[in-house]
Image (cartoon, rainbow, N blue to C red):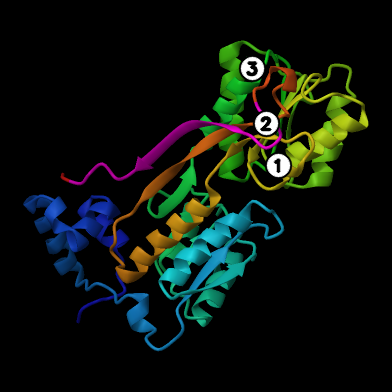
Amino acid sequence: MKNSNISIFTIAEKAGISTATVSRVLNHPELVNSKTIELVRSTMKELDYVPKRSSAQKNKGIPKLILVNVPQISNPFYSEIIRGIESSASNHKYRTLISQEPLSTDEEIRSFMSFAKSLHTNGIILCSPLSKPEQYHQIGESIPLVQCCEYASEEYSYVSINDYKAAFSAMEHIYSQGRRKIAFINGPLTYKYSTERQKGYDTFIHQSGLNVYPGWCISLAEINYDMAYASACQMLTSSNPPDAIFASSDLVAAAVIKAAQQYHLNIPDDLVVVGFDNIDISTISSPSITTVSQPRFQIGYTAGEILNEHIASPVAYTQHILHNTELIIRQSSVPQKNAQFNDNTIFSVPLFIEKKEESDTVL
């Protein structure tokens, strides 16, 4: 009797190849050589494997649903991500449900999956990080999965940016303004974006021979305005205050500006401030905030499109996409007397675009 419960991960492990290669043999055999095709097919035969039906086939007649998990709905960063996902979902006739359910423990994962299955969910987009690699399998082996913004598993598709390079570029700009006492207010290090931006900051500090003094590098428990304001006040009233602060979020950067104004510091003359994300607060803040802009709508939309491919074909090949970012230069980092722009003009500096795919198309 044929076994439809075996996954392509089992086939890949037994054959000693990647899941992407198994996927291509099943979905795009023209990209793989005959020896590899024969290996995969013989392994499938040995395991009595038959491809699973797609979610659309299994749930025929039931409204199509995509479940999106975000860590913090109140964080304005996710609004455009969600809008991009919803736009893609609508194009493919899917409904979208947003979840803020915590996914830290195995029990929380099981609860989340029970909820997803009860809704006959066709696909899942994760914007939240998971703590263990096997937790991704708990989700992805049952329901098509795409990682969005946060990613930790190469086995599943993801869409994000290169936070390390973006942070390094922001530091280069701060340095170019003559600042050498650069502090960093980061988000929680349980997130990949925080650890990568921390690496970008640390690498630049090391390569430039700069010093970082106690209290200049803070990781907040969450992206929270009040927490950021209190941290900035502590930095700016210390015996050795920084002359620039790089913030891992525009919300944090806005709190830094508020703290600086509380102590009658001029921005950017006394303190350069650079944020991240280019959310609405970066333009309405006074002064406006220099920031790293990431294409949040496009990231969400791309994640939705990739998920649709996985729903349509359970063996669609894994995609790893890092979108480009831009450094948007505004008033918080460049003195107006030196800037060739007004309040309604920005300069954008393209940083990079990178797309990753498995390298074993032909073995």
Amino acid type at circle 1 is: Thr
- Counting from the top left corner in percent of width and height, residue 90 is at 47, 71
Q: Which residue is mark 2?
A: 330
Numbered disc in front, either 1 or 3: 1
Residue drawn 50% across the image and 62% down it: 85
- Counting from the top left corner in percent of width and height, residue 56 is at 36, 78
Q: Residues within 10 Å of mark 3 (few under 14, many from 20)?
A: some
Res 230 quadrant in image: top right
Amino acid type at circle 3 is: Tyr
Pick the front one: 46 or 292: 292
Lower position in the chain sequence, tag 1 or tag 3: 3
Q: Compared to 224, does 25 lie above or below? A: below
Residue drawn 88% across the image and 31% down it: 261
Q: Count how many numbered circles sit on residues in the image.
A: 3
Q: Compared to 283, does 76 lie above or below? A: below
Q: Which residue is mark 3?
A: 175
Amino acid type at circle 2 is: Arg
Q: Which residue is mark 1?
A: 283
Lower position in the chain sequence, tag 2 or tag 3: 3
What stretch of residues is rendered in magenta?
341-361
- Counting from the top left corner in percent of width and height, residue 225 is at 80, 45
SS type, badge 2? loop
